[in-house]
Image (cartoon, rainbow, N blue to C red):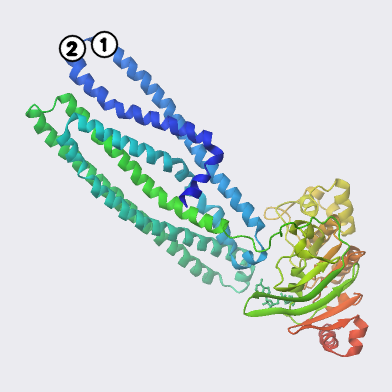
Amino acid sequence: MIRRFFSYYTPHKKLFMIDFFSAVVVALLELGFPLAVQWFIDRLLPDGNWSTIVSVGCGLLALYVMSTFLQYIVNYWGHKLGINIETDMRQQLFQHVQKQSFRFFDNTKTGHIMSRITNDLFDIGELAHHGPEDMFIAVMTFVGAFWIMLTINVQLALVTIIIVPFLIWLITVCNIKMNKAWKQMYSDIADVNARVEDSVSGVRVVQSFTNENYEITRFTKNNRRFRKAKLSGYKVMSFSNSGIYMMTRFIILAVLIYGAWLSFNNHLSYGELVSFILYVNVLFKPVDKISAIMELYPKGMAGFKRFIELIDQDPEVVDQKGATEITYLHGDIEFEDVSFSYDEHKPVLERIDLSIQAGETIAFVGPSGAGKTTICSLIPRFYDVNEGRILIDGIDIREMTKQSLRSQIGIVQQDVFLFTGTLRENIAYGKLDATEEEIVEAARRAHLEEFIHSLPFGYETQIGERGLKLSGGQKQRIAIARMFLKNPPILILDEATSALDTETERIIQQALNELAMNRTTLIIAHRLATIQNADRIVVVTEDGIAEEGTHNELIQKGGIFAKLHQVQYEQQGV
Ligand SMILES: Nc1ncnc2c1ncn2[C@@H]1O[C@H](COP(=O)(O)OP(=O)(O)OP(=O)(O)O)[C@@H](O)[C@H]1O
């Protein structure tokens, strides 16, 4: 874990070296200061030579100016190093999450992912800056100060050091407890985030059921749990800090009294006594530093461990070695003996065989939960099949790179996701380098032109949280415009179940028909009226593909489709 942590320093070696070197020089200057005071009291004062005193003062001033400058470097560049490392990790984590497969997002709450990318990394920057540098300086100062103290007076030095094993014990015990508490705290804040994410995204459901109080109670529980974990961490930390404070002050007092006795008996000069007391402070400064690191270390490491846990989770769907980059697909799709399940115990698709010709429009119908969406999710490799294979233009999709395969497939979801930004940016999401003409043409073909022209800022209208709110039909047309821009040979339409008014539905249907032209189109159909013109209808049930044929063929057959049709006809007058 620590080796991996240090690997993040590699790109910032130069910064680390400058910061580290400056910190070492500052520490050496601090280490030399009590000796200068001793020399001042024992040698310069009795001599009474004013000009030497002024010269020494000027020399010390120069050293202080240098030390101040170096301290600025340590502070600013050291923090810069920490921030750089934190930023690198956050960047790596975001990129890693972007590459994850659907199953990862099925199993991980958005709030938890957000927590890992933001909160968990907050303390890593501080640890990266202070950890190795302060540790080294602390050890160096401690050893240096103790060695000088031994040269001043051995007995006094031994009295001082007695306390150190107790300090180490206290720091170690508290560190273990703090480690636990901070880990719990990060896990609890992730739960708080997940709860906020859930109740804010689902606020319409919450309010329609008037379940606000229920949500508040659930949030309160999480929030209190977080408070408890954080408080217990601070409790241990406060105990540790107070313990260290008490022990160090106690030893200063002991040195003062024993030192005074030695001085009365002429075993110690005044200069040596003053210098020794200053060294006790120098000696315990590293202890303060180490205890600060001990506070930071478990916090930073708890975040780092959670970071590593995620980074080590490999995406499930990856490119095979030697996978080919596809530039164009014709659009013939073949399912060969395909079986698939989301989890081992519950097969969703078993031994499916299906052949779709390029340019064909094929509709999947069937009861809810039968596997229509699943069949379509396997084509862009959102999930990999468990058995069998899927071929496009005769090539197994696992032999193509994921990116090139997906570039040939367009998906219009039921629930269209719009990004915060302008209308233009949202349409251009289908082709990021689209020209102005291409965007306008796509909007025209998606029957969006009139609507856009009615807006005061047209294509520059802001959409999303602080912008324009769009209706379901308008969102769908933006999704269709994206597809016109992407222009893929294979199209998957997850048909909207939400009832649109007849006019909007007619316009959208028109745009969809135009979009489907000259492409292999797979429609996940919920309302049978919209698929009358499909080249073929595939009826999917829990037992697999039950029927296949044109609308008329299936009606005449009088099987499952005919029954479904009859039910919808009675309900909706189809
Ligand atoms: N991400 C998932 N993780 C685990 N199980 C899933 C997941 N998505 C779907 N399922 C399960 O797989 C089965 C098939 O679901 P699928 O969404 O493919 O059905 P569908 O025919 O498209 O249903 P609908 O018409 O309601 O959209 C269902 O039993 C469902 O519970």
Q: In the image shown, does 448 or 326 lie closer to the viewer? A: 326
Q: Position of residue 28 (x, y in %)?
A: 35, 29
Residue 456 in view in this figure: no
Q: Which quadrant of the structure image shows residue 352?
A: bottom right
**Where 430 sits versus 538, above or below?**
above
Q: Up-down: is 268 above or below 399?
A: above
> In terms of secondary structure, where does tag 1 sit?
helix
Quarter of the rendering occupied by the C terminus: bottom right
User: Are the two marked residues, 2 and 1, in contact with CB atoms closer than 8 angstroms?
Assistant: yes
Q: Position of residue 444 (x, y in %)?
A: 89, 56
Question: For this view, does 39 lie left or right of residue 480?
Answer: left
Q: CA distance from mark 2 to mark 1?
A: 9 Å
Q: How many marks?
A: 2
Residue that carries the numbered disc 1 in the rendered image: 52
Judged from the image, the quadrant occupied by ligand 1 is bottom right
- Give the image quarter of residue 327: bottom right
Residue 465 falls left or right of residue 324: left
Q: Is residue 339 left or right of residue 245?
A: right
- The percent coordinates of residue 141 (x first, y second) are 32, 35
Q: Amino acid at mark 1?
A: Thr
In the image, residue 51 above or below residue 322: above
Q: Amino acid at mark 2?
A: Asp
Residue at left offset 60%, top offset 74%: 209
The image shows residue 198 at horizontal and vertical percentages of 59, 65
- Mark sitting earlier along the chain (2/1): 2
> Label 2, on which residue?
47
Residue drawn 49% across and 36% down? 16
Q: Residue at x 44, y 34 (%)?
A: 20
Question: To which quarter of the image does residue 367 belong?
Answer: bottom right
